[in-house]
Amino acid sequence: MNKVKTYIETHKDRFLNELIELLKIPSISADSAYEKDVLKTAKAIKISLEKAGCDTVEICETNGYPIVYGEKTIDTNLPTILVYGHYDVQPPDPLDLWHSPPFKPVIKNTEKHPEGAIFARGACDDKGQMYMHVKAMEFMTTTNQLPCNVKFMIEGEEEVGSANLATFVKNNQEKLKNDVILISDTGMIANDVPSITTGLRGLSYVEVEVTGPNRDLHSGLYGGAVANPINILTKMIASLHDENNHINIPGFYDKVEELSLEERAEMAKAPFSLEDYKNALDIEAIYGETGYTTNERNSIRPTLDVNGIWGGYTGEGAKTVIASKAYAKISMRLVPHQDWEEITQLFKVHFENIAPKGVKIKVTPHHGGQGYVTPIDSIGYQAASKAYQNSFGKTPIPQRSGGSIPIVSLFEQELKSKTILMGFGLDSDAIHSPNEHFGVWNYLKGIETIPYFYKYFTELSS
Ligand code: BES
Ligand code: MN
Ligand code: MN
């Protein structure tokens, strides 16, 4: 990939400005008030793909937000890379914790990003990382170095579960046919410790509702004599973990893949400082399942976490009341072989079983997806590894991530191809949190690395 560095150096201000324009559009898929902005973002992506040299670009309508699809075929005998990314973002709230408005991108230096980072919702997840692929494509087409065929599929509903993308993939197998899928929507260990994500956790997301009496009651007249749904809900939730922080749902661990001691030893080689970890989060101690390290707890082990809990009086001052209902949203992160629908069912049955008489329980499944692991001896992984060696001067470390991109396992099932997760974000980039950002260095490094993946994947495939 001749002159990729020079090309980036020449065009970097424009690369940054284009991303900044994209980040100004609040494409929040979860909130229907932003519908126009989500659609506007899809149009902006379409134009950027056309400018980057795709032959055909279309906005494919779905029952939800559209999928932007683009392709460039140079020779049907050459391999085809399918790039996936998402243009929707998480809601930015709580807004008062942002140091600058989430949709007014600014570049500021940070300890981890001395060369500057772009602060905006979606900077890292996933507009910034997705746009690296558009700019890498621009480089390869304008310098006549695109070595293979490419397809882009950029969706607008990843942050809300990709329900319509699943249908799109099932109905468009021929159109989406590819030799490898390439995604930048994960992270890496550190800027001087490049890594390639080899696994994602699955997910089961449920909402629970506990109903007690048929109306809110005076807590003096009725307190102590009827089941208080909030007391009951918190008790039930507390019982879901035992004293070793093991999850108490019968059958939950039945299919969990146990890693060998060798594999765990291999994992432990990745650089990690517990002190830095604690300092970054302002915590005095870590917490989790007995018998596992922090890196194991957040990647190869399943979890159960309450994401939100509400009910009763939460306004100013005090109101003496026993609420009729209490609610919680709960996510379970799953590891390979655990089936998300089966786990959802196990949760539902167990949660209903442990409820005392005097309350009614409703469990509503939201969305979910299977976990994913990819081997490191595939052509795709090898090509990615060589690409990083070129641009970072180091061999990347394979690393399983704790996050989820549920659609990846569906890609494998429907399109029969492996996904390579080349993520360039850092855990400290605050995705989904206030002050999300993406390092300028990381953005440009991604643009530099991607063309090499194309080159090596094409070479290794022949
Ligand atoms: N890009 C993230 C997933 C991610 C981030 C994986 C960092 C690995 C490392 C994605 O946009 C995301 O947020 N996924 C959701 C699940 C989805 C169904 C809402 C998640 O992991 O919570
Ligand atoms: Mn993402
Ligand atoms: Mn996300």
Image: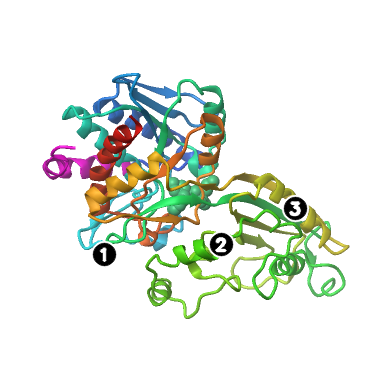
Q: Is residue 104 above or below residue 414?
A: below
Of the 4 image quadrants, the one containing the N terminus is: top left
**Is 294 in front, or is 18?**
294
Q: Residue lying farthest bottom?
A: 284
Seen at 31% across and 61% down, the residue is 193
Q: Is residue 333 above or below residue 35?
A: below
**Is 141 in front, or is 27?**
141
Residue 110 bears which disc, if any? 1
Mark 3 is surrounded, within 10 Å at the Cα level, by few (under 14), some (14 to 19) or many (20 or more) other residues, namely some
Q: Start and end of the magenta stretch?
A: 1-23
Q: Decide which of tag 1 and tag 3 comes sooner along the chain.
A: 1
Q: Is residue 291 left or right of residue 360?
A: left
Circle 2 SS class: loop
Mark 1 is surrounded, within 10 Å at the Cα level, by few (under 14), some (14 to 19) or many (20 or more) other residues, namely few
**Is 297 in front, or is 367?**
297
Quarter residue 453 falls in: top left
Residue 225: where, in percent of width, then height? Answer: 87, 72
**Do we see residue 92 in this rendering?**
no
The residue tagged 3 is: 346
Seen at 26% across and 29% down, the residue is 147
Quarter residue 430 falls in: bottom left
Q: Check if mark 2's residue and mark 1's residue have beta carbons within 8 Å.
A: no
The residue tagged 2 is: 260
